[in-house]
Image (tube, rainbow, N blue to C red):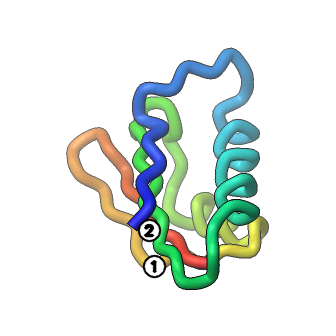
């Protein structure tokens, strides 16, 4: 499993656009057999599951699972 840790990222721009471009780059880099775990902080990315699903689907990936633990969000993605 590939892990992408965006929990401590500091971006000066819009977090939605940052997440969109980050997930798009994941889609370009991974193979169809790869599973990617994207780690986020809820305070920086305060979106509901439906928003995450739309972003991931737009980037031509699929969500295996969305886990929420304390203030952290884990997205498991596949191509």
Quadrant of residue 42 within the rendered picture: top left
**How many numbered discs?**
2
Is 18 left or right of 37, judged from the image as shown?
right
Is 50 left or right of 40, judged from the image as shown?
right
- Residue 32 in the image, given as x and y percentages of width and height: 62, 82
Q: Residue at x 75, y 39 (%)?
A: 17
Q: Which residue is mark 2?
A: 76
Q: Is residue 78 above or below residue 11?
A: below
Quadrant of residue 12 within the rendered picture: top right
The label shown at residue 32 is: none
First in sequence, mark 2 or 1: give its number.
1
Q: Which quarter of the rendering shows the N terminus? A: bottom left
**Neighbourhood count class around disc 1 (C-alpha, 10 Å): few under 14, some 14–19, many 20 upward:** few
Q: Residue at x 32, y 44 (%)?
A: 72
- Residue 26 in the image, given as x and y percentages of width and height: 65, 58
Q: Which residue is mark 1?
A: 64
Q: Is residue 52 above or below residue 7?
A: below
Quadrant of residue 57 within the rendered picture: bottom right
- Residue 46 in the image, given as x and y percentages of width and height: 50, 41
**Which type of secondary structure does the marked residue at label 2 adopt?**
strand
Is 1 left or right of 55, judged from the image as shown?
left
Q: Is residue 6 above or below residue 66?
A: above
- Residue 41 in the image, given as x and y percentages of width and height: 40, 37
Say which of 58 and 29 sits in front.
29
Toward the top, the furthest residue is 12
Q: Which quarter of the rendering shows the C terminus? A: bottom right
Q: CA distance from mark 2 to mark 1?
A: 5 Å
Mark 2 and mark 1 residues within 8 Å of each other at the beta carbon: yes
Q: Residue at x 42, y 26 (%)?
A: 8
**Which type of secondary structure does the marked residue at label 1 adopt?**
strand
**Neighbourhood count class around disc 2 (C-alpha, 10 Å): few under 14, some 14–19, many 20 upward:** some
């Amino acid at each position: 499993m590939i892990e992408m840790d965006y929990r401590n990222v500091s971006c000066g721009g819009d977090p939605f656009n940052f997440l969109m471009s980050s997930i798009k780059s994941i889609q370009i880099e991974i193979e169809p057999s790869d599973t990617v775990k994207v780690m986020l902080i809820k305070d920086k990315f305060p979106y509901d599951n439906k928003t995450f699903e739309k972003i991931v689907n737009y980037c031509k990936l699929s969500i295996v699972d969305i886990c929420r633990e304390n203030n952290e969000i884990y997205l498991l993605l596949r191509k």
